[in-house]
Image (spheres, rainbow, N blue to C red):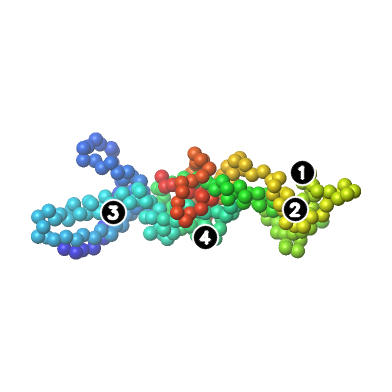
């Protein structure tokens, strides 16, 4: 026997819990939530192969085994299951970030779009969101980010003085030909001691030297790293909600026990991770 079977289950629900020695220990409610679409329907492809001459051959036991394997996969690798159905693969479980930043990249947005599609079609699922950092990479990245904010703030001051409306500092763009001007203003505004000439005036320095001195005096400690992790989680949650297809009640930001996530090959520590519940 070599057959492919399409199993269709409509409006599957659970009855009252009963004690039974034959009851499965698998978390079937989570598995059903992963498999049931927004219309309350489950569609399964179940292949059955075996020899009818084998006295131990049983179609029913094979079907149960396939369903059990499917439930196990749904629980142990839910994102692989969702990724196979909606695109994104196992990589749907996380969104990576550039060091020091909480801006979602184009690749990250693709994962979020796939996750939105999956959650929209699986309305019983909820999502936990946790932000993480790479202490070394993000510490240096944050220093660069804070430096650029100081430079942008100087241009914003100029624009406001000329009558332009105030906008968020991160929205300001400093052109390459403007950079030295506004970096110099930012450098001179810093309170740390600066090299001076023989008459006591602050020396004019090349761009790399001003940047180096400013970076040396910019603090990016554990608290700043925690704030970065939180901003990343909030940015992802906002991107998921922006679709309008997911209720806020299904999304939960969960503070992780540590700043650094579990190591994964070829995956940056600077990331947000998801957990299906």
Numbered circles on residues, count: 4
Query: Which numbered mark, 3 or 2, is in the foreground of this view?
Result: 2
Residue 22's label in the rendered image is none
- The tag earlier along the polypeptide, 3 or 2, is 3
Residue 56 in the figure: left or right of residue 42: left
Q: Which residue is mark 2?
A: 210
Query: In terms of depth relative to the viewer, which is nearer, 90 or 246?
Result: 90
Dividing the image into 4 quarters, which one contains the C terminus?
top left
Query: Which numbered mark, 3 or 4, is in the foreground of this view?
Result: 4
Q: Which residue is mark 1?
A: 192
Q: In percent of the image, x 79 and y 44: which residue is there?
A: 193
- Residue 182 visible in the snapshot: no
Farthest residue toward the top?
19
Residue 222 in the figure: left or right of residue 272: right
Q: Name the element at disc 2.
A: helix
- The tag earlier along the polypeptide, 1 or 3, is 3
Query: Which numbered mark, 4 or 2, is in the foreground of this view?
Result: 2
Q: Name the element at disc 3.
A: strand
Q: In percent of the image, x 88 and y 49: which residue is there?
A: 198
């Amino acid at each position: 026997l070599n057959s492919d079977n399409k199993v269709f289950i409509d409006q599957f629900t659970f009855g009252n819990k009963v004690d039974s020695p034959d009851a499965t220990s698998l978390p079937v409610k989570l598995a059903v939530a992963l498999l049931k679409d927004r219309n309350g329907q489950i569609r399964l492809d179940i292949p059955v192969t075996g020899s009818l001459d084998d006295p131990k051959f049983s179609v029913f036991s094979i079907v149960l085994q396939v369903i059990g394997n499917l439930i196990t996969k749904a629980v142990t690798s839910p994102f692989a299951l969702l990724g196979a159905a909606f695109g994104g693969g196992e990589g749907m479980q996380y969104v990576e970030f550039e060091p020091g930043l909480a801006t979602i990249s184009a690749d990250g947005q693709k994962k979020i779009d796939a996750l939105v599609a999956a959650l929209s079609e699986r309305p019983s699922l909820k999502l936990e969101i946790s932000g993480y950092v790479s202490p070394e990479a993000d510490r240096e990245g944050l220093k660069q980010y804070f430096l650029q904010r100081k430079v942008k703030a100087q241009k914003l001051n100029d624009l406001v003085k000329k009558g332009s409306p105030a906008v968020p500092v991160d929205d300001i763009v400093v052109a390459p030909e403007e950079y030295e001007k506004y970096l110099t203003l930012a450098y001179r505004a810093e309170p740390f001691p600066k090299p001076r000439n023989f008459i006591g005036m602050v020396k004019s320095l090349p761009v790399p030297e001003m940047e180096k001195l400013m970076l040396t005096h910019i603090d990016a400690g554990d608290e700043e790293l925690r704030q970065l992790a939180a901003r990343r989680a909030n940015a992802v949650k906002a991107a998921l909600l922006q679709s309008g297809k997911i209720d806020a009640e299904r999304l939960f930001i969960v503070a992780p026990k540590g700043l650094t996530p579990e190591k994964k090959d070829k995956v940056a520590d600077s990331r947000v991770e998801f957990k299906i519940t």
